[in-house]
Amino acid sequence: MTSTQINYQELAEKIKLWGQALGFSQVGFSDIDLSSHEQALTLWLENNYHGEMDYMARHGLMRARAQELVEGTTRVISVRMDYLPTNAKFARTLKQKNHAYISRYALGRDYHKLIRKRLKQLGDKISEYCEDFNFRPFVDSAPILERPLAEKAGLGWVGKHSLLINKSAGSWFFLGELLVDIPLPINEKSVNECGNCVSCIKICPTQAIVAPYVVDARRCISYLTIELSEAIPEEFRPLIGNRIYGCDDCQLICPWNKFAKITTEDDFSPRQNLDNVELLTLFNWDEKSFLAKTEGSPIRRIGFQSWQRNIAVAIGNSPYDETNIQALQHNLQDAQPMVAEHIEWAIAQQFTKLGAIKKQEAQQEKNQRLTARLIRSVEKGLPRDA
């Protein structure tokens, strides 16, 4: 159909149905005006909260100007797709300090390729309906403020942890966008319902949420274990615990996630037993094993060195075990300087814990001797016929 023949309200309803058939949990439409976010974005960059993510500063305010990214863009079709797997094992894995905790979104197949493919299919479907139609799909792959756009499209509101929250589906979902050049009717912006809740701010292990809706990436465990390519600052290492790839704490505590939906996508199910695996098992992977076992996974993009670095820190944080020290010393032999520094830190942590154990045992032995001496003293003072 030509642009003059199209009923865009009807088309919008069709797009939602097509999106649902492609596995999207929700589809919404927004205009491209994000001017109200430009000041906050500028301040965030000026504070260097983006850390080593140079691309954030490189693109600057383009992130709030979709029309500069793709010429002719007038609307954004935002989609979300649930990714929470069955039996997510959150608390159990976090409590098992000798097990690896990997952010739930990264347990299965890389979502970028899956969602981008579905968005491309959605765009092609619209092209069959519209004679003159241009689109570009994006999934975490463009300098664009996807969460504010999704908020304008009615998919949820940006929470105080900076993630999108949906009133009936929590926050365990991915986002994607189609930038289009047709005048689709826009949805009503979602209402923010965080209220006075500050649970996500309080629970953050590294206090990365420096103010409501403001995250200092340099302190965020997801940034430290994924985006940062250099050494993890020592002040944050003990706080990372057994989290070796990302962190879900701010989502785990969010009360809206009691409404989270289980994913219907098999590709988001855990692979390689990554939701229930010991740290030493992963630390024993060589680079060839790492590349083979993380093929098709988002984990692969951090590379083997960061993988070893993260696991070393987690082993350092785990309870003392002689096998931990043996594994650390073994991997130290061939480790590159950056990784070696973290392994040495982890070994020191393990020996510190060993020292604490021996000190406690010595104190217990001393207490036992004092108790025995006291008993003998009392017995000596008793009458012989007592």
Image (spheres, helix red, strand yellow):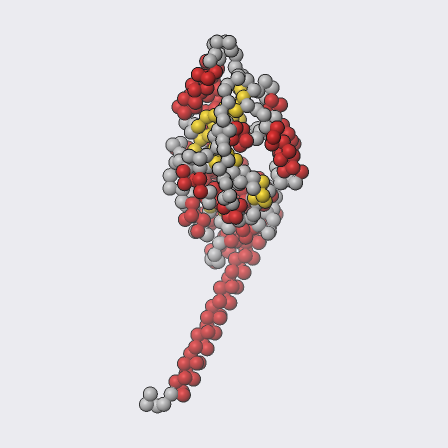
Q: Is residue 362 visible?
A: yes
On screen, residue 358 above or below 5 = below
> Which residue is found at the position 52% from the left and 53% from the top?
316
Q: Nearer the viewer, residue 91 or 347?
A: 91
Q: Is residue 99 left or right of residue 231?
A: left
Q: Is residue 248 visible?
A: no
The image position of residue 242, as x and y in percent, is: 49, 49
Q: Position of residue 101 (x, y in %)?
A: 46, 46
Furthest residue toward bottom: 384
Place of residue 97 in the rendered image (x, y in percent of width and height, measured from the top left)? 46, 52
Residue at image position (54%, 52%) is 238
Indicate whether 224 appears above or below 368: above
Residue 213 vs 317, above or below: the answer is above
Marker count (numbered):
0
Front in this rendered view, residue 315 or 293: 315
What residue lies at 49% left-to-right and 70% top-to-bottom?
362
